[in-house]
Image (tube, grey):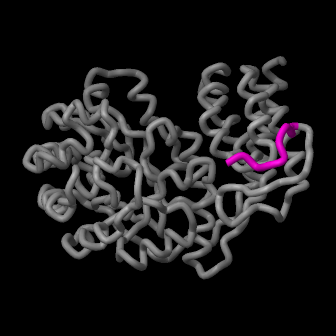
Amino acid sequence: MNPEALDYQLDSAIVTGLAALPAVPPAASRVVRIGSVPIYGHAVLAPMSGVCEQPFRWICRRAGASAVYTEFVSSDGLVRNNRLTERMLAFSEDERPVAAQLFGSDPSVVFDAVQKIENMGVDIIDVNFGCPVRKVVKRDAGSALLKNPELLGRVLRAAVDAARRVPVTAKIRSGWQSVNAREIATIVEANGAAAVAVHGRTQAMGYSGKADWGVIRAVKETVTIPVIGNGDVFSSDAAVQMLNQTGCDLVMVARGAQGAPWLFAQINAAFAGELPPNVEWAQRVQIAAMHLALLLRQRTELIAVRSFRKHLGFYTRGAPDSATFRREVFRCDSASEVLARMNEYAEFLAQFDGSVPKSRWGHTCNTQGPFTTSTEYDT
């Protein structure tokens, strides 16, 4: 396909995807101030590696996220002028307020990295003390610093001292193996952080088990800076319950937004006392196509198409015939063909309007369609 024809496809996908997003209630009058930065509303997008690329952040803001975080980046990579690391922090004005997250364990390196990030024009700089992933922990960064409160404090103080114009925040977990979130949050506040986000799981839990919201409540009762609650927010009901049960100032949505950026519109509606809007199967695929189109505006065709596959799995999981649809699309490296197949699939899914379950996942489907090899939703 010639470039002009592909451009038309991309424009069409973006327009259709925007129309498929549910309407966002008027901006909330409720405001939480993180340093000098006002955050209007209730829910922010969490930093997620491999997920929170610029197109996804942009869509989440359009869907009603009060603020968005970048993927976390290595402080070492930044000071070495790694191009990929720097590209991960690129953002558009439409995303503001945007927080850039970094990790590191050397205070001097973190100091230099924060100065570099601040010069990029972000609104907030967040230091990660919560990542449980082995490749981060073995570098004594992320949640490994929960075992070393003294070093954690020095790393955070270096970040705060380096940032002259923007607030610095921290993201922590309940603890390493045992819970020490109140101790860590006290250190975070004492070293100048403007807010703290708390994931209600220990490092040892990873992403298993159930997040302990009681830890978030305990931190809120301990510090005076804003507290952002994180963990197990997969629905608008959960967002409301977290805020009510913990008293946290903001709710941070992570995995719940994967393949479901409209969750922010549903959360906003719930807090406004309105019925959270449903997003039909066809609309979900249209929003996914917009996501791909935005990726194609930034990356080469092959990289965009292949990197999008992980997102498509979340957008379509539970939809009728989705496994067969994904198998067909995943064999294709042509952006034009992928978008065409997504349009066909959206047309097929339109017959299911009104049948979207309240949860993200599907149930039994007895309708045969062009992608059907099974009579059940994929789970």
Q: Write the residue at 43% across / 72% down.
A: 242
The percent coordinates of residue 275 (x first, y second) are 68, 77
- Between 325 and 162, the residue placed more toward the observer is 325
The percent coordinates of residue 235 (x first, y second) are 57, 65
Q: Is residue 378 visible?
A: yes
Q: Write the residue at 49% across / 35% down.
A: 50
Q: Is residue 115 visible?
A: no
Q: Is residue 169 left or right of residue 362?
A: left
Asked if the magenta segment contains residue 377, the reply would be yes
Q: Write the residue at 24% across / 68% down.
A: 219
The percent coordinates of residue 149 (x first, y second) are 11, 50
Q: Which secondary structure dominates the residues rendered in magenta?
A: loop
In the picture, residue 76 is in which quadrant?
top left
Q: Is residue 275 left or right of residue 107?
A: right
**Residues in magenta, as a range:** 371-379
Quadrant containing the N terminus in the rendered view: top right
Q: Is residue 107 left or right of residue 259?
A: left
